Image (cartoon, rainbow, N blue to C red):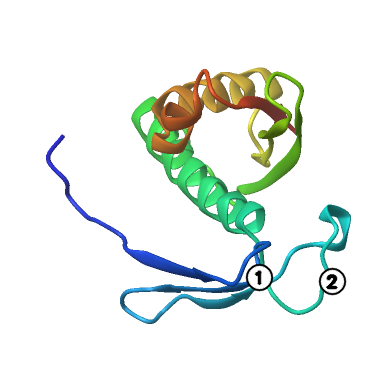
């Protein structure tokens, strides 16, 4: 693959998912905190699942816009809510992720919206990267 763009971010972690993350251009700078649900203290800060959810949702929306444009469908006020869950992986006693993408396309017939959502899932780089590795559910609302 010939790279068109490369994003670079550095995570400085002090064990247990606590630390910070920053992009090389300084635009993204966040403290990392382990959520209480995973045994951490919680508090002000983000976590890898939130960062992945934000990236996946934004990438998927872009893929959806591209697919809709090619199909001649005008989308307005689209909302993609990406829900990223982490849980135990019984196969190795580690952890694994699952994703549910809640996709709202106001003014688009539900069956057409479902078709566009599936096509966007086929087209989206995040969906391609996770295919076969992470369970992803498309939920057109």
Which residue bears the numbered disc 2?
41
Q: Position of residue 67 (x, y in %)?
A: 41, 31
- For the C terminus, the quadrant is top right
Write down the quadrant of residue 104 in the picture.
Answer: top right
Coordinates of residue 111 in the picture (x, y in percent): 66, 17
- In the rendered structure, find residue 30 and report the number of the disc placed on it: none
Q: Are marks 2 and 1 in contact (CB under 8 Å)?
A: yes
Toward the viewer: 85 or 36?
A: 36
First along the sequence among labels 2 and 1: 1
The answer to whether residue 46 is left or right of residue 21 is right
Which quarter shows the N terminus?
top left
For residue 140, side relative to residue 39 (left or right):
left
Q: Position of residue 131 (x, y in %)?
A: 49, 22
Residue nearest the viewer, comparing 139 with 134: 134
> Dot 1, how many residues are within 10 Å of its Cα: few (below 14), some (14-19), or many (20+)?
many
| Left or right of 4 on screen, residue 18 | right
Residue 14: image quadrant is bottom right
Q: Which residue is mark 1?
A: 18
- 110 versus 99 height, above or below: above
Q: Residue furthest left?
A: 2
């Amino acid at each position: 693959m010939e790279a068109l763009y490369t994003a670079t971010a550095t995570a400085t972690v002090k064990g247990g998912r606590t630390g910070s993350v920053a992009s090389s251009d300084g635009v993204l700078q966040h403290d990392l905190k382990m959520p209480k649900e995973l045994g951490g203290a919680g508090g002000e800060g983000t976590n890898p699942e939130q960062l992945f959810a934000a990236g996946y949702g934004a990438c998927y929306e872009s893929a959806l816009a591209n697919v809709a444009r090619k199909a001649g469908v005008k989308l307005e006020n689209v909302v993609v809510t990406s829900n990223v869950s982490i849980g135990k992986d019984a196969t190795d006693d580690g952890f694994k992720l699952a994703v549910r993408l809640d996709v709202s396309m106001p003014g688009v017939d539900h069956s057409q919206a479902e078709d566009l959502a599936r096509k966007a899932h086929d087209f989206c780089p995040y969906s391609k990267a996770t295919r076969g590795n992470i369970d992803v559910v498309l939920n057109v609302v």
